Amino acid sequence: MTANNLRHTVVLSLCGPNNSYLPGSSVRGVISMQDVLRVIQGDERLSFEKMAKKFPGLADKPIEQMREELKSQANQLASDPETAKKDILRTGTLALSVGSVALFASQSSWLADNSELAMVAIFVLGYVGIIFEEVFEFNKAAVALLMSTGLWVTYADYYGGSTGSASETVLDQLKEQLAEVSDICFFLLAASAIVEVVDAHQGFKVVTNLIQTKSKKGLFWTIGFLTFFLSAILNNLTVTIVMVSLLRKLVPNDDDRRLFGAMVVVAANAGGVWTPIGDVTTTMLWINNQLSTIPTVTELFLPSMVCLVASLAFLVNQVEEDSSLAESNLPPPSPLATRGVVVFWTGIASLLAVPVFSELTGLPPYIAMLTGLGAIWTMTDIIHLGEEDSEMKVPAALSKLDTSGILFFLGILMSIGVLDKSGLLKELAVFLNENLPSQDIIATVIGIASALIDNVPLVAATMGMYDLSEFGTDDKLWQLIALCAGTGGSILVIGSASGVALMGLEKVDFLWYAKKVTVGAAVGYFAGIGAYLLENAVLTGTLLGSAST
């Protein structure tokens, strides 16, 4: 039969010779032949010809007709402006990739003469690929790894008069950078696994049972302040992992949870500033005696809090009150099983013990985190002794981790590292020092730059620019750099380890974050700087002195 110019097949309960209708048979349905053939075409094991042989009742003419109709539909889809735009982008990307590979393979002298320009171009193109991941439909981890490889090849074979092969110095730098990045990746892997095991035992019920608010805005502020204070005693990366896992229990709506997760990044970065162990840049300055413990806590707490409150006050306006929290799939508060309580507090102790372990042993934090993972792994094996393929054990938790997110992290940090090793970031810092009128503005610009480039090499370069004999311990410059580098990373999602972790955990893309969060994070950033400058002026007497004159 034919309807709307499309052939259809009637499905009968019984069929006679040559698929004819029999008295007493009932009609079970009507199927469009176009739909049938579209499904068949998608199965690589079948073809139109095989269908014609299998079902002789299908003449060649209907088969050819369906084939032409499908071709026509494919052509119409290709004529769509959005499809055409994507085709152009993909073709351009492919041509650029092929051209880049050909340029490297040809050992062109242009690369040796313009190695710095080539490295900057690779970095910019890589970041464009990451930023517009949704447009190009390339996984950001793949782009980050390719960007890292391109930068290291250019640096090793063409930079600074290289002879076309990596020298021993470059190989040593590569090993050093990989060691530094591996520290962070193993730290992230171990922390994520611990959190996953705690979650598998419903350990977060200890916290979720205490949070009874059904107001989304109330929960927004509660999570923000909780994150802020936790990140002061843990590092902000660990806190982000823990809080995002907690939000999966509290906030059922995906869009809401992304906004809450972005708020966690802002709060974690702000909270990590005012203690020596909260943020890696503050820790760097503390270890190298640019900062000491008591002045850091007392003088950076207020600006960090102002940064948090200003950002949250701006972002909370995007939270729309509804009944989604009340309709959450979370069960009503109930006592947690003893083994769940044990696993929860063991996991928390493992996370809290990281700075203590590092301080006592002098070993890097990832060793402490791996030690904690080993301890909770052994404990859960004992708890679930005799249970085969238990979802509560660490191997099951490891299988759930976002490996591509960790590889993305690896690619980004290796890329930033080669820019640091080549001296390009140092040149940027010197340029800022020579062209900006004051250290306050330099620190502010460094904070803004850390939204795009990892703040660790930026702060490291800044530490090398200014001598402790000129700017002593707890000088205004060091405190402002700690504040700006820590909170400036929140302006863009790729500006901090917390933001990069959020990208992997909640699939937050660059453009969404820029649209929804960047302005709010910038408001908090500048509010925090203003609060610090005002506080410093009051403490040093310059504000009162200028007022009296």
Image (spheres, helix red, strand yellow):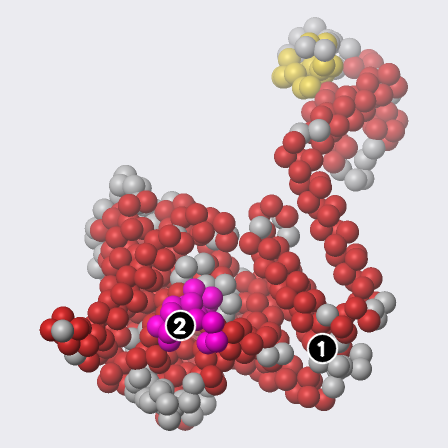
- Stretch of the chain drawn in magenta: 433-450
Q: Position of residue 189 (x, y in %)?
A: 50, 71
Relative to the observer, which residue lies in front, 403 or 46? 403
Identify the amino acid type marked 1.
Tyr
The answer to whether any part of residue 147 appears in the image is no
> Is 6 drawn above or below residue 53 in the view shown?
above
Relative to the observer, which residue lies in front, 351 or 457? 457
> Is 368 drawn above or below residue 150 in the view shown?
below
Please tell me which residue is depicted at 82% across the width and 62% down the height of the picture. 102
Q: CA distance from mark 1 to mark 2?
A: 32 Å
**Cβ atoms under marks 1 and 2 closer than 8 Å:** no
Identify the disc placed on residue 437: 2
Judge whether residue 208 is colored magenta: no
Q: Position of residue 24 (x, y in %)?
A: 66, 8
Identify the disc placed on residue 159: 1
Please tell me which residue is depicted at 43% across the width and 85% down the height of the picture. 466
Q: Position of residue 400 (x, y in %)?
A: 52, 62
Please tell me which residue is depicted at 83% across the width and 14% down the height of the picture. 18
Relative to the observer, which residue lies in front, 131 or 189? 131
Identify the amino acid type marked 2.
Pro
